[in-house]
Image (cartoon, helix red, strand yellow):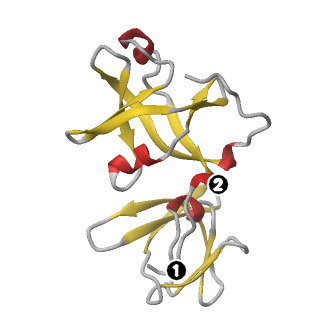
Amino acid sequence: MSATNIPESRDEEFILVGKIEGVFGVKGWVKIFSFTEPRQRILEYSPLFLKKKGQWIEAKITGGKKQGKSVVLALEGITDRDLALSQVGTELAIQRKQLKPTGKDEYYWSSLIGLSVVNLQDEEFGEVIELLETGANDVLVVKAKQGKESVERLIPFVLDEIVKNVDLDAQLIRVDWDSDY
């Protein structure tokens, strides 16, 4: 594994794409829980970055494949099972600049996290804390503080029908959604 630390990198420059969840075999391969869709897309990103002691460290993929419901991969410098075991639990990321540009009305989930959500009447709903994948459509999980309590809303991410506008520059999503929902 390359010991290249990324100088003065900020966490927002990185996007989590997976986590090392176990080992595979005796030659240092690791089993990955991939956050990408499809799962094996994680293999298309090289280098990956591993978070070690608060620092992102570059790691080149030297091999990989889909293995059942998981993805396994080999990382440069990890050549035996003991080294691989020491990596279990490590987060994997890519730099934001490694993402391919999106088309019109296409968004990476990571770009939507943290955006403020308001409805057509300018009522503030809070900010997107995560997205959920359902069979019908993706769903924004929007969280707001109301006094001492937090309120979460689930808003379907259906462009044009419910989600009227996503303005990444303004960090704002405008929705056609009633505050009583």
In this view, 133 is above or below 69: below
- Residue 27, position as x, y percentages in the image: 34, 16
Callout 2: SS:
helix
- The single residue placed furthest to the top in the displayed view is 82
Secondary structure under badge 1?
loop
Count residues near mark 2 (Cα–Cα under 10 Å), then give few for <14, some for 14-19, many for 20+. Answer: few
In-front residue for pair 108/154? 108
Task: Work out whether mark 1 precedes mark 2 in sequence or the reverse, and give the earlier one.
Answer: 2
Residue 42 x %, y %: 42, 46
Query: Circle 2 sits on which residue?
Result: 97
The residues tagged by marks 1 and 2 sit, at their Cα atoms, a distance apart of: 19 Å
Q: Quadrant of residue 1?
A: top right
Judge whether 163 appears above or below 72 on screen: below
Tell me where residue 29 sits by quadrant. top left
What residue is pinned by disc 1? 105
Q: Quadrant of the C terminus?
A: bottom left
